[in-house]
Image (cartoon, coloured by chain):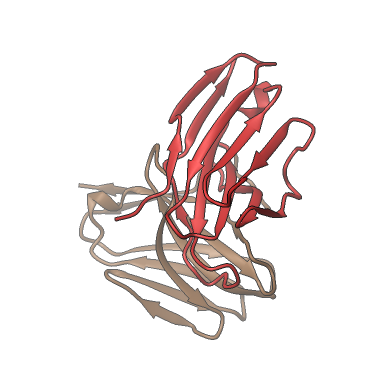
Chain colours: A brown, B red
Amino acid sequence: GESVGLHLPTLSVQEGDNSIINCAYSNSASDYFIWYKQESGKGPQFIIDIRSNMDKRQGQRVTVLLNKTVKHLSLQIAATQPGDSAVYFCAENIEGYQKVTFGTGTKLQVIP
Amino acid sequence: EAEVAQSPRYKITEKSQAVAFWCDPISGHATLYWYRQILGQGPELLVQFQDESVVDDSQLPKDRFSAERLKGVDSTLKIQPAELGDSAMYLCASRLNRDRVADTQYFGPGTRLTVL
């Protein structure tokens, strides 16, 4: 997959505002998508997932939107808090395979 | 709350030395994964176990890396000899069900390896 090396895309958001993190995927056979949050020095933490037969799923303060037409996934975080500061990864599973592939991460910085 | 355990958390070694990492998945989880994560990138799968069997090791550099899960519970990943390019975070994850991918993978805290 595409790599950005040490230069992660960064999104800076004011505390209390909504955040939108985007992810593009390339394989039309992908049927399951997951968003993970990774804080510095820790392993990825599951946030929310969505199957390809859905276009929207909501959790607590988070919403994932899936647009299969343009192969695009987004994570919306409502009322962003300082604790949301982390790197966010989308991951996709290709139908028939029992593993997920991680995309390029986005670093979210919350400005107090 | 049950967690995936990994040790050590940090390892510094010299190139050409052997290193080993240990993972204890959440109790009852059939599937176990080892990933390598280079700084600034997403995790990349090295090996996947279902119970004690390897189901995918296509991305594992088998000339120097080996992994085992002898009793289908905890697992060890070994590198011998370590090279400078092996410096990375090594993550272990586990998942409950054997057949359903649409099932959360839980990650451990990782082992940060530095090869000098």
Q: Position of residue B84 (x, y in %)?
A: 66, 21
Residue at (59, 65) in percent of width and height: A92
Q: Residue furthest bottom?
A: A53
Q: Position of residue A27 (x, y in %)?
A: 69, 69
Q: Residue A69 or B22: which is nearer the viewer?
A: B22
Picture layout, residue B86 above or below residue B23: above
Q: Residue furthest right?
A: B63
Q: Position of residue B36 (x, y in %)?
A: 59, 41
Q: Residue A14 or A68: which is nearer the viewer?
A: A68
Picture layout, residue A10 above or below residue A79: above
Q: How many marks?
A: 0
Residue at (59, 79) in percent of width and height: A68
Res A39 seen here: yes
Q: Quadrant of residue A41?
A: top left
Residue at (56, 53) in percent of width and height: B32
Q: Residue A85 or B74: which is nearer the viewer?
A: B74
Classify residue A5 as left or right of residue A11: right
Res A108 seen here: no
Q: Position of residue A39 (x, y in %)?
A: 37, 44
